């Protein structure tokens, strides 16, 4: 830099020092210190959590030189004019500072608002296979916030009723759609387990391979048809033959009954199982007892309230006889003699049916859980050799005549013994071996899943008839027989899954536990319970003692996710199924399954350990433990890769609803809030649907269910907010914002998994309109173009 430049800089510096008014710097400093504290400390880098760049002190020098070069032009100005830029510069700096402070305050407010709104900005799409399926499922229904008028009244997909329908036609259409679209949670669980069994990924243990092999051979109906009736006829021959074929070696009644109970889990004249004593109030329900109950008779019967006796349903007698005749024909019975055996079987069944009674009647008469010793039972029902039969069924247990058993219909057992004794010695049809034929046909029923398609078709045909009769006679207590329960139009895969679960429940439980991520489920449960407890304090209780009692009950509850009480290791499972050899014959595999089931009964009596309840889908309360089955945390209702908005909108709501039912069954009588909210939502529904002249109020049960589901939705939303507060990042499906996805998933799930739909006077998705009355909770205001439907008019 030359001498002229240096002199110019010196002159400028002296001029600035001499012309700056005294006291200016302290005044500016005071103004700066008077600004609000938060605005002074906030900066964009702090708000957005970016690291500020490191500044080199030398980087400021070029700017200083530029300012000096610009200020050198002041030399050519008049003295009065040269004083002005300094004041202007300070004023501009102060204004700029204020503007920055306001800007940063706005940024801070927006940032906090976004956090308060659970960051409804999409982070990224979920591209897992489960999310792809969920996206396809959601695309089947209309967007609730794009078409609110009809969606929240009829939200169950493309099959929802036409809005052109009016009055009772619209109501009937709504009910029909709900019945059609409601899926059983247990069916979804069976589908999920089916995928696990059909999967070929990874190396499977010996027990898993046997479970998969059993299911695979069950699905191979072609091999069953090829095998035909020969496997069953060979088994009948092993039992001594039967008089239907003309070849019977007159086997002893009690000997045959003992073999059926021991090897084939078949109980023709009575049921035998193992369980706790339900009358034990000591709280230490560890001892198991042999339970003897009335049988599941094959003939369709109904209860007569006037005579307090059961009787055969006359309309079903002809198709029942036809099905029995068809079975005997398939088994090679000569055409001329089949009807004799069918008539004897039907007559014996109808005689036994007289003393069979429904559970409610037996409970009212005190006929449940009557404790007797085996010796006492033998005295009351002498036709059956009880000690020999029970020793055969529980052959590894040292039973004596002094051991106790529990009876659940002693009058039936006594009358059954009298009937059997009469048919053994004095009945005119005794020569045809009716008791032996009765037992063989019951064995046939046990083995129906392992026989060829002709037997299944015969059973299905009877099931259809029984279904029609039961639909026409809903006023009677109908007990239509075991055949209709097994073959009531269920698809083959479902029957095979149920049979596989019976024998391999522990294996499926282990597969389930390995496949389902429990961490996400536990977090969801914890957040739902926390929101559940906070919801209780918002209620108006009948008195303070009631609130304290409920809060103590809820606070003492400990949630536990279970598939089984005892979780055996892989090696223990392989040992448990080591005696089972699965081959290509499903009939052979099924016989082994029956033996396995009886061994489980023996183990339960000896060890007192229950098997895995794999198919449970409902939470329950056991003491202070809230048992939450793992079976509810499955697609399409839950998946660890789903966005949390979807998991909380679906499973969070369903779980909250179940908890309200389990923990607060009598809430209607304990809190006036239940009635008020239920009535408020119903009044809102009447207003939206133009039913002002309709029913002003709904029954108490419906008011409670409306409150339960409304509260469950609030609990799920609050729990989701807590989850997002802890962990803001979340994904999305189909481009929906998080709140949008939460409410859309909730609405669609109620079409698929609402177990309480019969108590709801409207679509559960309508509850969204009440929630969205607080506009900040929803992605958009719900304004219906129709003047009669303004969804955001008021809340409850």
Image (cartoon, helix red, strand yellow):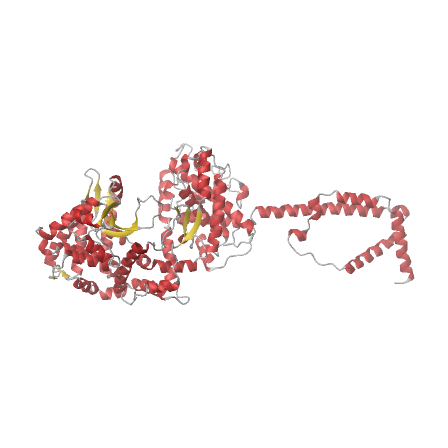
Q: Is residue 655 above or below residue 210?
A: above
Of residues 523 and 689, the one nearer the viewer is 523
Of residues 757 and 660, the one nearer the viewer is 660
Of residues 534 and 399, the one nearer the viewer is 399
State left or right for residue 331 relative to residue 583. left
Q: Position of residue 604 (x, y in %)?
A: 31, 55
Q: Position of residue 205 (x, y in %)?
A: 38, 66
Q: Identify the residue shown where x is 58% and y is 46%.
A: 116
* Residue 458 in view in this figure: no
Q: Is residue 696 above or below residue 250?
A: above
Q: Position of residue 436 (x, y in %)?
A: 15, 56
Q: Position of residue 679 (x, y in %)?
A: 43, 35
* Residue 741 in view in this figure: yes
Examine the image and state in which quarter residue 600 appears: bottom left
State left or right for residue 316 relative to residue 134. left
Q: Is residue 476 above or below residue 447?
A: above
Quadrant housing the N terminus: bottom right
């Amino acid at each position: 830099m030359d001498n002229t430049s240096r002199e110019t800089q010196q002159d400028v510096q002296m001029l600035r020092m001499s012309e700056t008014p005294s006291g200016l710097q302290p005044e500016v400093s005071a103004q700066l210190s008077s600004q609000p504290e938060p605005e002074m400390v906030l900066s964009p880098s702090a708000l957005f959590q970016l690291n500020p760049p490191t500044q080199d002190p030398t980087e400021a020098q070029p700017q200083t030189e530029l300012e000096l070069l610009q200020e050198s032009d002041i030399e050519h100005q008049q003295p009065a004019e040269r004083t002005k830029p300094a004041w202007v510069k300070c004023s501009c700096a102060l204004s700029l500072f204020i503007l920055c402070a306001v800007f940063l305050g706005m940024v801070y407010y927006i940032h906090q608002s976004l956090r308060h709104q659970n960051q409804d900005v999409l982070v990224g799409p979920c591209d897992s296979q489960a999310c792809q399926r969920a996206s396809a499922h959601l695309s089947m229904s209309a967007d609730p916030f794009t078409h609110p008028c009809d969606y929240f009244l009829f939200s169950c997909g493309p099959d929802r009723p036409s809005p052109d329908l009016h009055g009772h036609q619209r109501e009937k259409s709504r009910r029909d759609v709900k019945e059609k679209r409601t899926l059983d949670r247990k069916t979804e669980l069976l589908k999920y387990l089916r995928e696990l069994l059909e999967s070929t990924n990874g190396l499977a243990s010996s027990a898993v391979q046997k479970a998969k092999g059993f299911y695979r051979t069950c699905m191979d109906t072609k091999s069953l048809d090829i095998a035909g009736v020969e496997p069953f006829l060979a088994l009948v021959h092993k039992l001594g033959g039967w008089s239907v074929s003309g070849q019977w070696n007159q086997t002893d009644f009690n000997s045959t009954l003992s073999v059926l109970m021991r090897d084939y889990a078949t109980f023709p004249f009575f049921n035998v199982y193992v369980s706790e004593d339900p009358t034990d109030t000591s709280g230490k329900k560890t001892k198991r007892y042999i339970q003897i109950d009335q049988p599941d008779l094959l003939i369709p019967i109904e209860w007569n309230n006037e005579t307090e006796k059961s009787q055969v349903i006359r309309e079903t007698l002809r198709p029942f006889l036809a099905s029995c005749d068809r079975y005997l024909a398939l088994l090679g019975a000569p055409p001329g003699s089949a009807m004799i055996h069918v008539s004897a079987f039907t007559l014996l069944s109808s005689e036994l049916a007289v003393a069979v009674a429904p559970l409610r009647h037996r409970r009212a008469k005190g006929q449940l859980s009557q404790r007797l010793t085996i010796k006492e039972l033998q005295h009351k029902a002498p036709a059956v050799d009880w000690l020999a039969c029970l020793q055969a069924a529980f052959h590894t247990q040292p039973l004596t005549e002094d051991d106790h058993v529990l009876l659940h219909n002693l009058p039936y057992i006594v009358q059954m013994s009298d009937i059997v004794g009469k048919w053994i010695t004095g009945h005119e049809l005794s020569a045809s071996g009716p008791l032996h034929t009765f037992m063989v046909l019951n064995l046939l029923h046990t083995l129906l899943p392992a026989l060829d398609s002709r037997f299944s078709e015969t059973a299905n045909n009877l099931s259809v008839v029984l279904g029609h009769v039961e639909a026409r006679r809903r006023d009677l207590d109908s007990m239509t027989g075991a055949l209709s329960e097994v073959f009531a139009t269920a698809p083959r895969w479902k029957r095979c899954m149920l049979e596989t679960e019976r024998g391999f429940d522990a294996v499926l439980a282990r597969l389930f536990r390995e496949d389902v991520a429990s961490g996400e489920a536990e977090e969801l449960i914890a957040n739902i319970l926390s929101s559940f407890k906070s919801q209780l304090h918002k209620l108006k209780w009948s008195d303070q003692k009631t609130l304290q009692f409920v809060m103590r009950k809820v606070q003492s509850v400990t949630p536990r996710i279970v598939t089984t009480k005892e979780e055996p290791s892989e090696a223990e499972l392989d040992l448990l199924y080591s005696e089972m050899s699965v081959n290509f014959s499903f009939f052979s595999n099924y016989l082994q399954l029956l033996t396995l089931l009886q061994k489980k009964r023996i183990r339960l009596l000896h060890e007192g350990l229950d098997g895995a309840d794999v198919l449970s889908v409902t939470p329950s309360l056991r003491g202070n433990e809230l048992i939450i089955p793992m079976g509810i945390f499955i697609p399409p209702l839950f998946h660890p890769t789903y966005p949390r908005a979807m998991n909380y909108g679906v499973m969070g709501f369903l779980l909250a609803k179940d908890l309200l039912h389990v923990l607060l069954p009598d809430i209607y009588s304990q809190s006036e809030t239940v009635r008020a909210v239920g009535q408020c939502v119903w009044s809102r529904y009447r207003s939206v649907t133009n039913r002002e002249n309709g029913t002003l109020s709904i029954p108490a049960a419906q008011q409670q269910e409306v409150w339960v589901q409304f509260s469950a939705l609030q609990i799920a939303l609050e729990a989701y907010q807590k989850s997002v507060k802890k962990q803001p990042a979340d994904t999305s499906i189909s481009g929906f914002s998080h709140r949008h996805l939460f409410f859309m998933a909730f609405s669609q799930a109620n079409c698929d998994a609402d177990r309480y739909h019969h108590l709801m006077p409207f679509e559960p998705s309508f509850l969204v309109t009440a929630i969205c009355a607080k506009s900040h909770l929803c992605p958009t205001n719900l304004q219906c173009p129709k003047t009669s439907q303004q969804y955001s008019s008021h809340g409850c």
